[in-house]
Amino acid sequence: MKIFTNKDIKNFFVIVSCILISFMFLLQLIVWFSYGTLNLSLLLLSLFSGLCILGTCFLYFHKQNQIIEESIDQINLYISGYTDARIDCDKEGSLYKLFHAVNTLATSLNAHAVKEQKVKEFLKGTISDISHQLKTPLAALTIYNELLQSEADDSAAIQDFAAKSEKEIERIEMLVQNLLKITRLDAGSIIINKAPQNIANIIQDIYQHFEFRTKQEQKNIILSGSNSIELFCDRDWITEAISNIVKNALDHTDAGNQIKIEWKKLPTVTQITITDNGSGIHPEDIHHIFKRFYRSRFSKDTQGIGLGLPLVKAIVEAHDGNITVDSTLGKGSIFVLSFFNLTKM
């Protein structure tokens, strides 16, 4: 029988049987010394009781063995690929606690498997997007190189193609750098070094960075906020996030338009708002602009690589903040970065 293949159970029955036989022998020995004769009725009663005890133990272990066999069948079913297989654990007892733990492990493994599948799909999509994004500048560089070779005697043409090649190289570099930054943020390999930072100083640095471009393009950046407000953040990363939004605003505004950067401290959050009166975002795109490599079918921007705003979102979320956007087509956009204020415990 299967239950006796278990050495511990087999030993248990041998020990119990020895105890029962010894008991019956000692009982008859006591009767012999007390009355000088054996008692057949007492012997039969002892034998019956012993058989009942052994039978009860056998049925118990047989039932437990059936439960374990059924559980093993469910585990094998799960291993074979049926991930919905579970062990019945509705009753009480240590064995059912073990079954519940096994079911919990199976559920956890399923969750990890789903997560891994999503990661694989994401990587597959990302690689496809990167390949697609790199094709355009690489093709352009190939063409410019061929033109440079054919126009070896024309210095003006060489300078023109060299300048265009440089822009394409910058585009590739920006794609790779932004992708690396987002990937490192996702992987948690970048340490966000937070410290109290003066927001006015951060915004002033950003203003100076874009000052030459705004004058060239006849645009205006307006700053509005208190000089005393501080934000607990990593200065470099927050500067990167705000700069990306300002650059995006400059890319989508015409000469004479303006971009306003405003910061204020509310009771629970500190907000940084970037407002422009440019082309705005199409309603169809408003819920997709933070997706990586997303390109609107309404966009006239042929140089964008679709990583600026996703990078902003990753940085803000790494600071436990959130970003929202409101936009009206043809009138402009408003980006709001919100960060919870530190409270003294």
Image: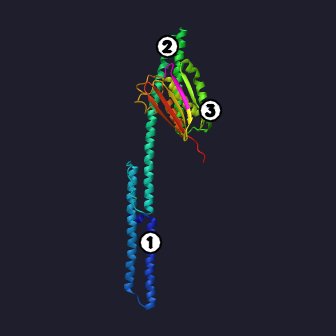
Which of the image's four quarters has the N terminus?
bottom left
User: CA–CA distance between discs 3 and 2?
Assistant: 53 Å
In the image, residue 118 above or below residue 25: above
Q: Earlier in the sequence, mark 3 or mark 2?
A: 2
> Which residue is under mark 3?
227
Residue type highlighted by circle 1: Val
* Picture disc at residue 14: 1
Picture residue at 40% right of the left edge, 50% below the top: 79
Q: Position of residue 344 (x, y in %)?
A: 60, 46
Please name the amino acid that badge 2 sits on.
Leu
Camera-side mark, 3 or 2: 3
Q: Quadrant of residue 54?
A: bottom left
Check if mark 2's residue and mark 1's residue have beta carbons within 8 Å. no
The magenta stretch spans which residues? 253-262
Which of the two labelled residues, at mark 2 and mark 1, occupies the earlier sequence position?
1
Secondary structure beneath label 1:
helix
Secondary element under disc 2, as helix, strand or loop, is helix
Amino acid at the residue labelled 3: Asn
Residue placed at 41% from the left, 25% from the top? 298
Cα distance, mark 2 to mark 1?
95 Å
